[in-house]
């Protein structure tokens, strides 16, 4: 195993509301190694974006991290002061969001924004920072970077803007990048370009990437490992090939069967009855039990802990050996 | 088999000129954006014709013109032989109207939030005066709710009480309420999670089998189109570049754009795939390239492609294919 960059253990995020605390993330654990892309996939409300926000310390009130720990290269970052965390963000953890326009200030030239980031986190002089910004723009595939550096965000197309955001995220050479639906707003042909770019940069720089998306196709192409989330919990985590070809958790099985693919023609898609529970009504035991085709009595009372099945870790009582023996 | 829907030489321009005063002061002429340019296709009864394309390709504009929500600038739409534009056929068109319905991407935006679902579904029945008597209408609404997999008691709820997938079921029930036989779906599942999307796609296919519906299905998602369509039209910058039976299109794409699009889609079968993505993005439709609009991104483009618009011949609009260069 390569060096672990990010280690999340039993992370729990609670939102305090008038009707009492709601648990959005419930004891989530995973690691990301150097140069590795971990895909975090799930349907809306699964808690994948909140997990990303928790790692970069951007959970807004009334939400708070109420349990577990987050370590970046062994150093705890969930307990840092807001000021210390602000220095980690951008410097050690880069961010890419779905809508590049929200990450870019429309009133500043893109070059100035990259230079600002570089100067805030490194010792570079104004002149070298500008040269470095041009290099970064070239690296993310922006044509004529020495000219485009003086353009404003609105002068760039959607795909080019997302490239600028990636350049911005990479500026301070972070150890970890959190990419939250980075290609969702883009057309497929541009999406393919951005995925390829992200994969190449991650490999070249040895950056760990947490890729949050709802698109299993993107995960299949980009990620090394994948965590399937459901109702704030990790249902299954393992190597991408294993989880896609042979998922174990009944939710993951249903999810893979529900995705129409280009490669094979299916007469009917497998469908999971019902929908994701609301945070106010997460079922007891396994959160998936009311929709699960293989549910049995234990699932309704006891929450399954992750069990090693092949190369994956699966939170499902079906794979508990003691259960089979009994 | 005679065509159920016949679309010929459909064109739509949008006036994107600056306000009159600006034009006078800045001495600028009026400017038009050609959203749809000479599009023609036919749909047989009981068939699913899908139009696929990236954003800005004009696919939604075509859908709106087919159902009569938007008057075409030129060309004609005939449904069961009745023209959707000719004023002399207004009476026949009025009788036809109830049989054509549209399903939108965001079902919530297409429903009155202050109306109970029962009233929403009954609206077309009342508008077209299809059933007399409150009891009979209520019975029909209950039957429609059952048809789309909801409970007759759901008619007492408001739209906000449903999940996204259930709301889309309500939208389908409303579309069927007027005894529609032709449904136009504009990205009907794009706002839904994959497991819910599978439910809606399966439902649409079941209803088609049971009621003999004809679908025009608009989507940017090629995998969904492959799953739903019997025939597919691919649009790029307002023009239809390829029309083929779904099976042929996905097995043997002919137009360079179709090939590029199919290659760009991330798919579950492509775990860890490395590839060379196509460069470039869709040009600005206000100022499209001359000749074939795909020529700046096309690997096969030559001088003829840059000068001359290729006609749609034998299902594909491409000089390279017609000259045997592809």
Image (spheres, coloured by chain):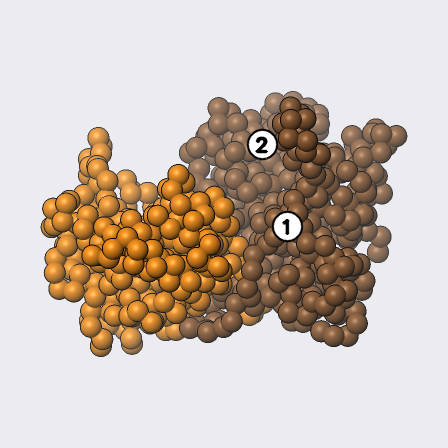
Chain colours: A orange, B brown
Asked whether B17 or B2 is in front, the reply is B17
* Disc 1: CA contacts within 10 A as few (<14), some (14-19) or many (>=20): many
Say which residue label 1 marks.
Answer: B57
Q: Residues within 10 Å of mark 2 (few under 14, many from 20)?
A: many
Q: State the image coordinates of residue A81 (x, y, percent, origin top left).
A: 11, 46
Disc 2 on helix, strand or loop? helix
**Quadrant housing residue A91:** bottom left
The residue closer to the viewer here, A236 or B117, is A236
Q: Is residue A279 above or below residue B195?
A: above
Above-or-below relation of A226 to B25: below
Left or right of B286, for residue A82? left
Q: Give x and y (percent) for residue B27.
A: 68, 31
Residue at numbered disc 2: B121
Residue B288 horizontal/vertical position (percent)? 67, 50
Kindly indicate whether the residue at mark 2 contacts the one at mark 1 (C-beta within 8 angstroms): no
Dots 1 and 2 on the same chain: yes
Q: Nearer the viewer, residue B113 or B123?
A: B113
**Dot 2 falls on which chain?**
B
Which residue is painted at 50% across and 39% down in the image?
B167
Q: Secondary structure at mark 1?
A: loop
Q: How many marks?
A: 2
Tell me if residue B191 comes above or below residue B174 in the rendering: below
Residue at 66% across, 29% down:
B23
Q: Is residue B266 left or right of residue B15?
A: left
Distance, label 1 to label 2, CA atoms, is: 32 Å
The relative height of residue B237 versus residue B144 in the rendered view (above or below) is below
């Amino acid at each position: 195993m390569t060096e672990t960059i990010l280690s999340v253990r039993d992370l729990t995020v609670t939102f305090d509301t008038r009707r009492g605390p709601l648990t959005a993330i419930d004891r989530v654990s995973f690691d990301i190694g150097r140069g590795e892309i971990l895909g975090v996939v799930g349907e809306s409300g699964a808690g994948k974006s909140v997990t990303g926000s928790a790692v970069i310390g951007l959970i807004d009130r009334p939400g708070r991290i109420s349990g577990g720990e987050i370590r970046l290269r062994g150093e705890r970052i969930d307990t840092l002061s807001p000021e210390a965390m602000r220095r980690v963000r951008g410097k050690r953890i880069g961010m890419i969001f779905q809508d590049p326009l929200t990450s870019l200030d429309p009133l500043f030239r893109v070059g100035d924004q990259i230079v600002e980031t570089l100067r805030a986190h490194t010792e570079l002089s104004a002149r070298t920072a500008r040269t470095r910004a041009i290099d970064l723009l070239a690296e993310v595939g922006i044509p004529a970077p020495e000219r485009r550096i003086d353009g404003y965000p609105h002068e760039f197309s959607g795909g080019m803007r997302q490239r600028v955001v990636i350049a911005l995220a990479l500026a301070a050479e972070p150890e970890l990048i959190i990419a939250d639906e980075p290609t969702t707003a883009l057309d497929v042909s541009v999406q393919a370009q951005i995925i390829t770019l992200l994969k190449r940069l991650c490999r070249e720089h040895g950056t760990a990437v947490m890729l949050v998306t709802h698109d299993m196709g993107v995960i299949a192409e980009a990620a090394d490992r994948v965590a399937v989330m459901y109702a704030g919990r990790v249902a299954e985590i393992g190597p991408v090939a294993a989880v896609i070809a042979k998922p174990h958790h009944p939710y993951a099985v249903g999810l893979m069967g529900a995705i129409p693919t280009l490669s094979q023609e299916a007469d009917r898609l497998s469908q999971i009855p019902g929908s994701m529970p609301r945070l106010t009504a997460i079922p007891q035991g396994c959160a998936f039990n009311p929709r699960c085709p293989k549910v049995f009595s234990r699932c309704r009372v006891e929450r399954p802990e992750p069990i090693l099945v092949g190369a994956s870790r699966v939170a499902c009582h079906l794979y508990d050996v003691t259960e089979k023996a009994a | 088999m005679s065509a159920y829907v016949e679309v010929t030489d459909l064109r739509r321009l949008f006036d994107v000129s600056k306000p009159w005063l600006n034009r006078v002061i800045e001495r600028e002429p009026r400017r038009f954006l050609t959203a749809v340019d000479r599009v023609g296709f036919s749909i047989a009864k009981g068939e699913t014709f899908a139009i696929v394309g990236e954003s800005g390709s004009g696919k939604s504009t075509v859908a709106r013109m087919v159902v009569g929500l938007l008057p075409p600038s030129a060309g004609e739409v005939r449904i069961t032989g009745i023209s959707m534009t000719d004023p002399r056929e207004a009476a026949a068109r009025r009788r036809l109207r109830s049989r054509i319905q549209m399903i939108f991407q965001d079902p919530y935006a297409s429903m009155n939030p202050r109306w109970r679902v029962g009233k929403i579904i009954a609206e077309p029945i009342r508008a077209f005066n299809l059933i007399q008597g409150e009891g009979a209408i209520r019975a029909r609404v209950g039957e429609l709710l059952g048809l789309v997999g909801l409970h007759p008691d759901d008619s007492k709820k408001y739209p906000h009480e449903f999940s996204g997938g259930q709301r889309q079921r309500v939208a389908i029930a409303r579309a069927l309420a007027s005894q529609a036989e032709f449904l136009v779906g504009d990205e009907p599942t794009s706002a839904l999670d994959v497991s819910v999307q599978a439910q809606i796609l399966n439902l649409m296919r079941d209803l088609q089998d049971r009621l003999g519906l004809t679908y025009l299905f608009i989507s940017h998602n090629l995998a969904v189109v492959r799953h739903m369509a019997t025939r597919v039209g691919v649009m790029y910058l307002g023009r239809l570049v390829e029309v083929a039976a779904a099976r042929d299109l996905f097995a043997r794409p002919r137009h360079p754009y179709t090939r590029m699009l199919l290659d760009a889609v991330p798919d579950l079968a492509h775990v860890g795939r490395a590839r060379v993505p196509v460069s470039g993005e869709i040009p600005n439709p206000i100022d499209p390239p001359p000749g074939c609009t795909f020529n700046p991104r096309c690997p096969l483009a030559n001088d003829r492609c840059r000068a001359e618009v290729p006609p749609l011949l034998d299902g594909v609009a491409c000089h390279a294919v017609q000259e045997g260069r592809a």
